[in-house]
Image: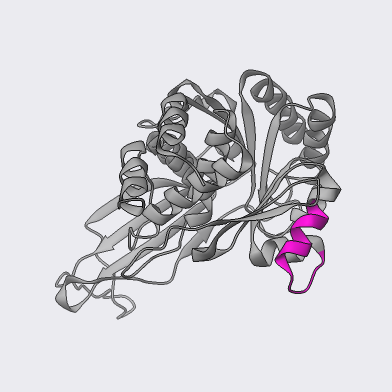
Amino acid sequence: MITFERLTALLDRFPRLTVGLVGDLFLDRYLEIPRGAEEYSIETGLEAYQVTRVRNSPGALGTVMNNLAALGVGTIRPVTVIGDDGHGYDLLQSLASLPVDTRHILRSARRLTPTYTKPLRQGAGGVWQELHRLDVRTREPLDRETLDQVCREVDEVARTSGGLIVLDQISEENQGVVHGAVREHLAGISRNQLEKLIYIDSRVFLRRFHFGTLKGNRSEILAAAGVEADAEQAVRKLTARTGRPVFCTVGEEGCLVGRPSGETTLVPGYRVSGPVDIVGAGDSASSGIVLSLLAGATDIEAAAVANLVASITVQQLGTTGTATPQQVIDRWQEMHAT
């Protein structure tokens, strides 16, 4: 679905691109509890887990940012809201190694920085096992003043970026950055800037977006279209709604691309052997699609790049994987070797 010359030409353009993002930025905090460091509380008699290492990394919107950076993007401009707290400080520190313009990250004393704390306990044979996750998040809508500021930042980022990725991570109505008011503001940008790429990935509320380039997995696309089982029918329905292409990831089968004309194309995936970990595969595919489209790819070429990227990230076990341009090239050559 994509030639070697075309693939390398697209990858060469990625460092010249600026991508804006809108959504919830989380801190993923890993607490390592090694084997043989047991201690018990005198007061409660319960084991006091002995943490010997703390690792922080950006999650949710940060997963997309990690993937964009690994693929060589020039600049990332996220619009999000975090807390004015220690977790927020650590989150900003975790972005230091990425090409991120942090000027549009709002800090609010009224919010907690969304944080997934993941204790990892070392078991027999040195294998790490994840214990119960601890989630920190404000479970109420953004205040009106902050929403207005988010919309102003979105305007600026849309003006200074080649395109926008909207990641609607929060499953509860209006509790995240992609609030109904922000969604309506994005719809206005889409109407007024017809050539602007607004790429939308929403875990629960994809059906609420009647604009932009929609992306989802099979179940998300079916739910958004109100279709029971036929992914092609669902994709056609959504492209007719938005007037833009729709990308539906279908696991190892690849990516189903729909066009407003009603045509659908299944771009075959790159099957890999051995164990796989699909966590973050959708975000890595999104990064490949968006950068390729902004670099001048057709929708089919963009899906082919996404499949290459995802085939690499799913082989990275126990972590949210990324792919570099050289890995993408190597995978293409591996799959097309005669």
Residue nearest the observer in this picture, 282 or 135? 282
Q: Is residue 23 visible?
A: no
- Residue 104 sits above or below residue 304 on the image: above
Report the number of discs: 0
Q: How is the image coloured?
A: one colour
- Residue 262 sits above or below residue 104 on the image: below
Residue nearest the observer in this picture, 233 or 206? 233
**Would residue 335 appear left or right of 233 to someone viewing this image?**
left
Image coords of residue 62 (percent x, y): 49, 43
Residue nearest the observer in this picture, 61 or 1? 1
Image coords of residue 187 (percent x, y): 82, 36
Report the residue that reaches farthest toward the front. 338
Q: Quadrant of residue 37?
A: bottom left
Q: Which residue range is magenta in the image?
A: 226-238
Q: Quadrant of residue 225?
A: bottom right
Image coords of residue 2 (percent x, y): 49, 42
**Would residue 40 appear left or right of 145 to someone viewing this image?**
left
| In the image, residue 227 lies in the stretch drawn in magenta | yes
**Would residue 1 appear left or right of 246 to someone viewing this image?**
left
- Residue 2 sits above or below residue 9 on the image: below
Q: Residue at the spot x=30%, y=81% of the render?
A: 45
| Secondary structure mainly formed by the magenta segment | helix
Q: Is residue 65 visible?
A: yes
Q: Residue at the spot x=45%, y=29% of the render?
A: 73
| In the image, residue 110 lies in the stretch drawn in magenta | no
Image coords of residue 31 (percent x, y): 32, 59
**Would residue 111 appear left or right of 6 to someone viewing this image?**
right
- Residue 298 sits above or below residue 323 on the image: above
Q: Residue at the spot x=45%, y=66% of the render?
A: 133
